[in-house]
Amino acid sequence: MIIDHTSPTPPFEQLKQQISDGRASGQFPAGHRLPPVRQLAEQVGLAPNTVARAYRELEASGVIETRGRAGSFVTATAESARKAAAAAAGEYVAVARRLGISDADSLGLVRRAQESPNLN
């Protein structure tokens, strides 16, 4: 992330925009752990309170979630969830085919998994 200190846009807004844009583009996928406040502040040349403000506002708008000492993580968008599911489906198809499982049997396995009460 880069902060333009000559921009009329406040640094915390620049940071918020870059994280939001990264989430939308997939650069920061769902579950991506953001750097700790102090570390990011040092990297981009801002005061820790400025980064903390950006994180607070991003959390309030649902772009990130903070899990206490575990850190701050990017939340999923509907589009990023679809992309992740499509990638997982592609990986599943490739593995099933390598194992010699027919497409019909593979779909049956997916349907049974969807009906499973133990599905997470």
Image (cartoon, rainbow, N blue to C red):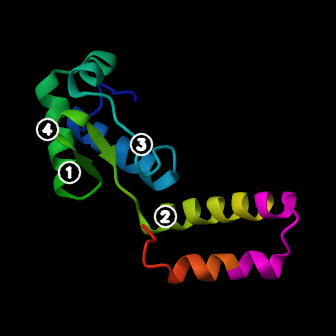
Residue ID for mark 3 = 32
Q: Image height check: is 90 above or below 39? A: below
Q: Secondary structure at mark 4?
A: helix
User: In front of the other: label 4 or label 1?
Assistant: 1
Q: Image height check: is 107 above or below 88? A: below
Q: Earlier in the sequence, mark 3 or mark 2?
A: 3
Residue under the image location 44 percent in, 46 percent down: 22
State the image quarter where residue 111 is shown: bottom right
State the image quarter where residue 78 is shown: bottom left
Q: Report x, y in % for residue 63.
A: 30, 54
Residue 108 vs residue 81: left or right?
A: right
Q: Earlier in the sequence, mark 4 or mark 1?
A: 4
Q: Report x, y in % for residue 108.
A: 70, 82
- The local crowd at label 1, few if under 14, some if 14 to 19, many if 20 or more residues have their Cα within 10 Å, is some
Residue ID for mark 4 = 53
Instruction: Please check the rendered image and state whether residue 28 is part of the magenta-colored stretch, yes or no.
Output: no
Residue 25 vs residue 66: left or right?
A: right
Tell me where the magenta segment starts and ends, as one range.
95-108
Q: Is residue 10 visible?
A: no
User: In front of the other: label 3 or label 4?
Assistant: 3
Return the mark for residue 81: 2
Q: Amino acid at mark 2?
A: Ala
